[in-house]
Amino acid sequence: MDISSFLTSLVTSFLVFLVLMMIFSWLQRKPSNEVIYYPNRILRGLDPSEGRGVRTRNPFAWIKEALGSSEGDLVAAAGVDSAVYFIFLSSVLTIMVFSGVLLLPVLLPVARTDHNITLKQKSNTTAFSDLDMLAMGNVQEKSTRLWAFLLGTYWVTLVTYFVLWKAYKHVSDLRASALSAPGLRPEQYTVLVRDIPPVPEGQTRKEQVDSYFKALHPDSFYRSMVITNNKEVNKIWKKLETYRKKLDHAEAVYAESKTSSKPEGTKPTMKTGLLGLIGTKVDTIDHCNEEIKDLLLKLETEQKITLREKQQNSALVFFNSRPAAASASQTLHAQQIDTWTVMEAPEPRQLVWTNLPIKFHVRQIKQYVVYGIVFLTVVFYMVPITAISAFTTLSNLKKLLPFLKKVVDRPEVKSVLEAYLPQIALIVFLALLPKFLMMLSKNEGIPSRSHIVRSASGKFFYFTIFNVFLGVTLSGTLFASLKTVLKHPSQIIPMLGKSLPGNATFFITLVALKFFVGYGLELSRLVPLIIFHIKKKYLCKTEAELKEAWAPGDLNYATRVPNDLLVVTIVLCYSVIAPIIIPFGVAYFGLGWLVLRNQALKVYVPAYESYGRMWPHMQARILAAIIIYQLTMIGYFGVKKFYYVPILIPLPILTLIFAFLSSKRFYLAFKYTPLEVACRNAKETPNMDMVFRAYIPPALVSDKFDDTEDQFEDARSEVSRTIPV
Amino acid sequence: MDISSFLTSLVTSFLVFLVLMMIFSWLQRKPSNEVIYYPNRILRGLDPSEGRGVRTRNPFAWIKEALGSSEGDLVAAAGVDSAVYFIFLSSVLTIMVFSGVLLLPVLLPVARTDHNITLKQKSNTTAFSDLDMLAMGNVQEKSTRLWAFLLGTYWVTLVTYFVLWKAYKHVSDLRASALSAPGLRPEQYTVLVRDIPPVPEGQTRKEQVDSYFKALHPDSFYRSMVITNNKEVNKIWKKLETYRKKLDHAEAVYAESKTSSKPEGTKPTMKTGLLGLIGTKVDTIDHCNEEIKDLLLKLETEQKITLREKQQNSALVFFNSRPAAASASQTLHAQQIDTWTVMEAPEPRQLVWTNLPIKFHVRQIKQYVVYGIVFLTVVFYMVPITAISAFTTLSNLKKLLPFLKKVVDRPEVKSVLEAYLPQIALIVFLALLPKFLMMLSKNEGIPSRSHIVRSASGKFFYFTIFNVFLGVTLSGTLFASLKTVLKHPSQIIPMLGKSLPGNATFFITLVALKFFVGYGLELSRLVPLIIFHIKKKYLCKTEAELKEAWAPGDLNYATRVPNDLLVVTIVLCYSVIAPIIIPFGVAYFGLGWLVLRNQALKVYVPAYESYGRMWPHMQARILAAIIIYQLTMIGYFGVKKFYYVPILIPLPILTLIFAFLSSKRFYLAFKYTPLEVACRNAKETPNMDMVFRAYIPPALVSDKFDDTEDQFEDARSEVSRTIPV
């Protein structure tokens, strides 16, 4: 790629971004689009136009607003997890800025004034781009100029250590202050208990749990809630909700028909059979009312049965003080370690109810099976795709679906299909991958959604590094040379060193495309906007349906974080080899910070709060990127036949030591809530009933509100009544 | 070694054992020897003759008594740690008996009826012993008979897993029941706090600790004791104790002189200078009295200074209930993990006071430095010895110590010295090794003596395996081939396989010698007996001096356990190759069990109680032995060119999985006290003052007993006074 085509693609991307930003600033001013551009504010009950820049014609107002927002604003609007994500963005940004400040003015002239490439061009006909003149490739072998690059390698590493240590400390403090904030958070009074041993003769599960915890925590135990198998009751409840929605919809349709032409209106009808396509025609409103009445009765019976007979070997135990719960969740309870295992309870909204009763050893096995599957997916992901594309060759398709024959046999269709079938399989597979990884992570038996997201994000990271980064770099040679690599694992370092420099331009273009087009689309929210307006016009009749149509979702860390980490890995790996990539990295994370800050403050609504437990994962993966970078550099200096390569060998070891030290220093406070933190601002007597109610799953909440207590009467301890609530 | 010389050495050893046992049964009947053969009983205030077999003339009475003792008796007499050591002995014994029951009747005939060795003897002149005819070496290459040996390999492995799992469970229960026994054990109410941050302005260390723990544990905090730097006060106290002993001794001498000839007696005198050799002559009793008076005053002043001004960054915190202390010791306290670190307090008697104030990161560094030194010692232990022996050559000695010249130049002395000087260096080094390892372990900053012993024992194990077992087996070839091994680590397996079989007879003789002579000496206690009688006759005048002379010490796990584990490794490794070793292993552990049971019940007095925390260490090392065994077998089957060797490859992996599973299942309950266990039989209101006093170091206890409270007044919390003690 020569410099002109590179610039063309860059300018095009930039223009796309500008256009999208203009569209954004025009669309967001319309009141009817408020629910797309300010859902977070609306849901928090704020006036969407409250911000300074709203409704002004200045297309850069949102930037001012994003820059002006403090970390406190962000935590209030989007929670600690978002704030931690921004610490991640700004840390990476800082690393790149600091690296660039030294590397750009020093390394670019050093590289440009040498003439390795011109020498090579004379001897053979390989095409080199103009950008390559600014890279380490232009320095001759064994040149003393390489000393500058070697020092650059150390500089980037040290900057990273410094920034990451600071950031870890910052996140740690942020987490502590969030955990010790006043305000009632039910999960801070709750401990999740799993692997409860079989019920002894003559006791109920409930009595077993209560007597156990009453004995061990006589002063602080409040009450317990035994986890039940809610499959049946959930089914009924979902059906009930569907009918309720249908009823609301039908009533809205009926009301609409009244106002228009005939004042009596037309009652909407429906068919009772499969998907409303077959069966007898009935009045929708009457039918729904009947069904709801039926289902309510069924639900009540099923609720009782569930609470009484479907109790599982897991429970939530509530304590009447934050320190007591924090301490209990960290204490080994039973002498048999695979029974009565305790942990801090996740928030009610992120509790994965169905994973709770999975037994200790089954969880272990599931975990290792999942690890195995992920390993195979990462390494052999090409295999199923090849298999599918072999299976979906045209001749096979014709056999299976003979009616396609006529279409497929036309030459123009045929050639297109033959060319793209494997790619389509690849795209479908890549699109399904995050969901697949989420499903795998869920199947490990993890009890909280945030942990599942973290776990899936980690898996996705390994996938992108292995397949996108290494895959592109070694461009197919990896599989061919896998045998060599397995035999001599150290061979991968010179291989990386040899292959990496050639791909610099490709990755720079990739990063540029990602930030200009990607963040442009992110900011303008064109897709959700269009979907919302279509739904609003043709489908939604009630308020609830509308609200569902514009529900913004969350930042989706499971794919966002690994994608960012891929860029981090790319930029770090090229930072010394082709320092010209650094400004693009800075632009990616700078623009990302701005755009996402806007989205976090105004659009997305967090689905859960894990108080920054994502950070140790992100930090570990940045360090993994640094190690890849260091190994690459060792390899590339080797290719350049630089005698002092061994000076770089301590670097990966140093990174491992840094990783060990920082996890030793900070990690435990992420795994547990320190007692000190739980004690600060601890409320004297919280409303324990509210804590308890927060964990009742919606399907088990009775319609008659006062009844709830009775519903849970047999799922309650006797002590609770004596404690003033 | 042919069969006759082997039998000779065996019979000789056995005779030595019989003689020693006879001596034992004759000596132990004399009342004057009671303190040597029954010190444990005497110290527990029991009548030494209480046992059934005592004072009978039956030389086997002690065996009956040992066999008749229950685990409960043992725990009462020698504590849980001893009981765990016997579980170790009986587990190993069971493994060997089970292995032998199948391997001996099957493998011996299979080996004997083949004729590999006779075939080989025809072709060359290598000498083979008769014992080798019974070993796997007598089976021909590629023979189908090898299937029997392969199954034998699996059998030994499975038996080990089964026995170890059972034993782990047993030890775990034993530990739990000991920890939950009634009775006041101060360490169960105490938490050790280290890494206390610097004292804030305007507070004392004491106030800082008290206010911190009062805030976090308002209901259960009782009082704290700040660790002080006791170097000075200990020095004065030791001097004081010496003078007191001297005074007692002098008074006893004086009293003795009175009764003999002249009724007024002779007052003993001493010189005040160095070692009592120079200086003015004074009356000992007067001089000691004066010195004691002086020192008492000094001690009092120093005690006050120590308590007030020498407070360190570590403290003991006392809780008023067992569960509260157990829970607190497992809970992360501070958000900054390297401050306020907590752990279960060791017993007062095993607290390593000087290690407590070492800081978090310093401890880490010390640990890794020690690991490095141990690694170097294990691998290169020959180097310093060679250096020393080179230095102590005769010519060098003559130069350094010219007065030796005449002696050394005599030809008979010269030849002996020249032959033995390197060996002497080796012996001295080996004798110093356990002490050196103990010192190293202490320098890791470990706060309890039992942990130091565990740690030293582990180090010693690696040393014996690497240097004695591998060293003898590969007989010097290891260093020569170290380069090969480092290049191709997998080469060590065939090397082991090739070298091991040749050394079977050597190791059998070693084990036999060890149990007959070693346990004979252990039982008869000849050395302590002789030393005691000499001391009694010539040195001891007072009761205290006598008591010191017969003080029995403890079982000394630091060297005993690794030595036993060496035998375990040897027997396991040869169990299939030369099954004839199994009876010797059985004899070693059977006899060891009997003799040491006797010693544990009557002689040794435990120096500490760690409630079986030695077990996970021992279990891990038995598994390490099993892995060495499995690798050896893979190597040896390879040497035998058996096609089905790959069937053995899962074995080491299986062992690793077993190790992982059993530690996952049991280990945490060894690391922490489970809450369930702490709650069982928890005393309502213990005498907290006694708990507190138990931890006051002797040098800080004031003579005037009532004063102690005042002495510690400023090292006490104000709360304590409001709690009824």
Image (cartoon, coloured by chain):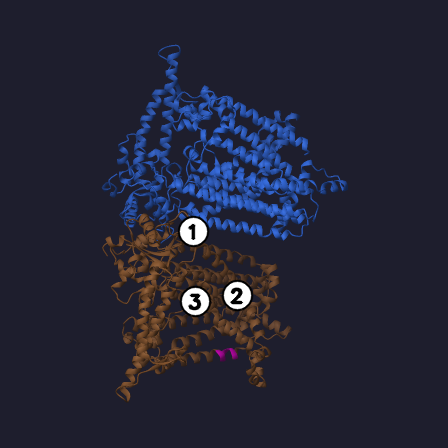
Chain colours: A brown, B blue
Which callout, 1 or 2, points at the residue further toward the start of the chain? Answer: 1
Which structural element holds mark 2? helix
Q: Where does the N terminus of chain B fall, quadrant-wise?
A: top right
Q: Which residue is mark 1?
A: A338
User: Are the two marked residues, 3 and 1, in contact with CB atoms closer than 8 angstroms?
Assistant: no
Q: Which residue is mark 3?
A: A558
Q: Which residues are magenta?
A: A5-9
Residue at 57% over, 27% down: B17
Q: Is residue A6 magenta?
A: yes
Tell me the crowding category of disc 3: few under 14, some 14 to 19, or many 20 or more residues within 10 angstroms, Cα based: many
Vertical comparison of B264 with B277: above or below: above
Residue type at numbered disc 1: Asp
Among the 4 quarters of the image, the one containing residue A695: bottom left
Tell me the crowding category of disc 1: few under 14, some 14 to 19, or many 20 or more residues within 10 angstroms, Cα based: some
Q: Position of residue B293 (x, y in %)?
A: 31, 26
Which structural element holds mark 3? helix
Which callout, 3 or 1, points at the residue further toward the start of the chain? Answer: 1
A117, A159: nearer the viewer: A159
Q: Which residue is mark 2?
A: A377
Foreground disc of the pair 2, 3: 2
What distance separates the C-alpha of mark 1 from that of mark 2? 31 Å
Among the 4 quarters of the image, the one containing residue A61: bottom left
User: Are the two marked residues, 1 and 2, in contact with CB atoms closer than 8 angstroms?
Assistant: no
Name, please, the residue furthest toward the right: B123
Which callout, 2 or 3, points at the residue further toward the start of the chain? Answer: 2
Residue type at numbered disc 3: Ala
Foreground disc of the pair 3, 1: 1
Whether residue B194 appears in this view of the structure is no
Q: Position of residue B175 (x, y in %)?
A: 42, 41
